[in-house]
Amino acid sequence: MGSDHPLAQKQTQSTGCLKHRKDIATTITEPVYKITVLPDGEQFDCAAGQPILTGAHAADVLISYSCRSGQCGSCLGRLLAGEVTYPRGQPDALSTEQRDAGYALFCSAYAVSNLTIELIQPEFPR
Ligand code: FES
């Protein structure tokens, strides 16, 4: 089969397309933000496309949780620096007053910048 065969040209074009797709795949990357957790100062990286709680647990940083869906309030903490978003809307367990006062629910919040957060330790009966 010579190089001027129609099938040979098609293969060349196909290879070119795959190479182009590979180039696109390597240039489109999801932002990753640095999350600093107080009071201990632990840090972890969190991809923009995942909830902060998921990123924390992937890095073995413990944030308390229960429902993972914004219903219980177990993952409530304070946002001391940076911004978060709630792609599925403001969670039920986070009031507008809490949000305006700098509180966040980490199971539902997604970072849109580097963050400094403060965990609120759950109180257990003694
Ligand atoms: S784990 Fe229930 S609100 Fe976040």
Image (tube, helix red, strand yellow):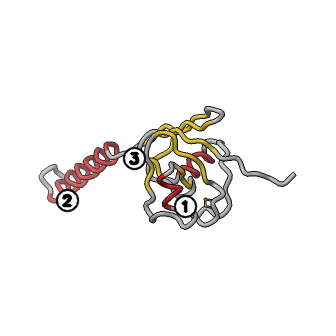
Q: Considering only order in the chain, which callout, 3 or 2, is on the residue closer to the N terminus? A: 2
**Residue 7, numbered circle:** 2
Mark 1 vs ligand 1: CB under 8 Å? yes
- Indicate the quadrant of ligand 1 in the picture: bottom right
Residue 15 percent location from the top left of the image: 26, 50
Q: Residue at x 61, y 53 (%)?
A: 76
Say if 101 sits above or below 42 in the image. below
53 or 19: nearer the eye?
53
**Disc 1 target residue:** 94
Q: Residue furthest left?
A: 4
Residue 40 percent location from the top left of the image: 66, 33
20 or 26: nearer the eye?
26
Q: Amino acid at mark 1?
A: Leu
Report helix, strand or loop for mark 1: loop
Mark 2 vs ligand 1: CB under 8 Å? no
Residue 36 percent location from the top left of the image: 55, 36
Cα distance, mark 2 to mark 1?
A: 61 Å
Q: Residue at x 56, y 55 (%)?
A: 105
Query: Image check: 125 left or right of 57?
Result: right
Mark 3 residue crowding within 10 angstroms, few (<14) / some (14–19) / many (20+): few
